[in-house]
Image (spheres, coloured by chain):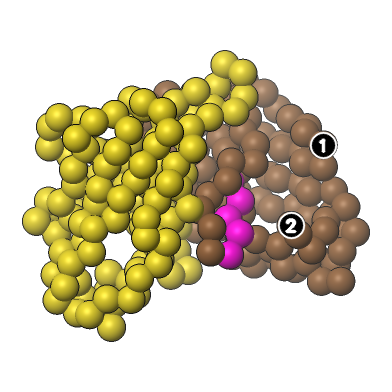
Chain colours: A yellow, B brown
Amino acid sequence: SAVISQKPSRDICQRGTSLTIQCQVDSQVTMMFWYRQQPGQSLTLIATANQGSEATYESGFVIDKFPISRPNLTFSTLTVSNMSPEDSSIYLCSVTGTGPFPGHYGYTFGSGTRLTVV
Amino acid sequence: GEDVEQSLFLSVREGDSSVINCTYTDSSSTYLYWYKQEPGAGLQLLTYIFSNMDMKQDQRLTVLLNKKDKHLSLRIADTQTGDSAIYFCAEQPGEGNDMRFGAGTRLTVKP
């Protein structure tokens, strides 16, 4: 299965600033996703990163707040803009592709970026 | 219900069996997953089960699926302190479709 490198692993940011999170995959993948995991909660899909076109955002998430780039099939970035303390979460990159089980097409997750906004 | 539901906490003693339960939402979900999240780490796929299966065993892990009740469980035999983590149940209606996650069950294993 794909190996994902996500950077930074954690950051503490000032209110009103922006942070860009990078997701690098060791192989070409069809689909890349960005998730948010708020403290004590489950994962929520932010958007699907589309190669060569605008990302597809889920309800409640907008491009101005979470701009996403995907210049090729192995790399994507998520920017958290104009941050407030409510943006403090873990942000995870995920990809689909052939999984660790024969015949399975599944999801692999990065190790996440733990963001704290002060 | 609208959400994938899991109890939030489970505490067991080392060597005992752990059973983590999940109720999912979509009777047509094709794939059901269990992920493990250790502190400071991302999600690790533990195991999965297809909707046409009732049970799947993989070493210390046993997954049971009750499609009628939309109930999924994960049993960890001979639980070890290294099993302490958050376990997420997830459903996926079909390949390429969005996954829906439960809130996660925090498993604590006491020596």
User: Above or below — where is B2 with respect to A18?
Assistant: above
Q: Nearer the viewer, residue B10 or B82?
A: B82
Quadrant where the image shows the C terminus of chain A: bottom left
Residue A108 percent coordinates (x, y): 48, 38
**Label number found at residue B83:** 2
**Label number found at residue B67:** none
Q: In this view, does B44 lie to the left or right of A61?
A: right
Q: Is the magenta stretch mostly helix, strand or loop?
A: strand
Q: Residue, x 43% and y 33% (percent of image)?
A: A26
Confirm whether residue B31 shows in the render.
Answer: no
The residue beneath circle 1 is B59
Read off the magenta span: B35-39
For the image shown, how many numbered marks are present on the structure? 2
Chain bearing mark 2: B
Query: Quarter of the image holding residue B7?
Result: bottom right
Chain bearing mark 1: B
Q: What element carries label 2?
A: helix
**Residue type at mark 1?**
Gln
Residue A39 belongs to the span the image colors magenta: no
Q: In this view, does A41 lie to the left or right of B18?
A: left
Residue located farthest toward the top when viewing the structure as drawn:
A103
User: Above or below — where is A55 with respect to A105?
Assistant: below
